[in-house]
Amino acid sequence: MKTPRELLLARHQSAAPKLDAIRRKIIAELNHEVTKKQSFFAAFVSSFPARSRNLWLELIWPSRRVWASLAAVWLLLFAANFSMRDHSQPQLAVAPPLPQTILAFHQQEQMLTELIGPNDPPPAEPAKPIQPRPTSERRLEIETA
């Protein structure tokens, strides 16, 4: 007695050559240059949703509590920053200094110059030109020094 598998295989064995012909035809169509270029572009474009899903599943989903906590902290920081903002109108014009203030400042400068003295830097000494010497003389200087 034959098993059910053997019965099914015997019944459909006649369809195997037809399926092989269809398979060869499809493979021949896929091996054209134009089809290869189109299939590369289609595969490249279709890989973006898969990559984004993989990114979601590998990076974000396992640590979703951490990401949610970080989002909550950023929202709190944004709310605190927004609440601390100064809502008053800025001063556009500053009042000019009073003449008494300017006079007091000039008097302080005069007293400071009297106490310290003039602020002239001392004259710099001219640089001495370096004269090259023979190597033998340099060694003597080093040994005697």
Image (cartoon, rainbow, N blue to C red):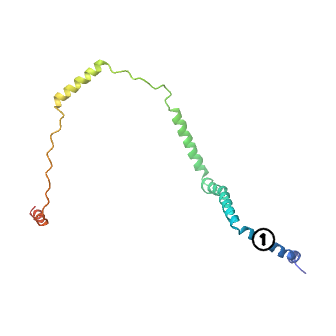
Label 1 sits on residue: 25
Quadrant where the C terminus sits is bottom left
Residue 99, picture quadrant? top left
Taking the spot 14% from the left edge, 53% from the top edge, the residue there is 129
Comparing 127 with 46, the one in front is 127
x then y, percent, for residue 115: 16, 29
| Up-down relation of residue 121 to residue 142 (above or below) | above
Badge 1 marks a residue whose secondary structure is: helix
Side of 115 where 50 appears, left or right: right
Quadrant where the N terminus sits is bottom right
Taking the spot 83% from the left edge, 76% from the top edge, the residue there is 17
Side of 102 where 20 appears, left or right: right
Residue 38, picture quadrant? bottom right
Taking the spot 57% from the left edge, 46% from the top edge, the residue there is 69
Amino acid type of the residue that numbered disc 1 sits on in the rendered structure = Lys
Comparing 66 with 111, the one in front is 111
Side of 21 where 109 appears, left or right: left
| Up-down relation of residue 23 to residue 115 (above or below) | below
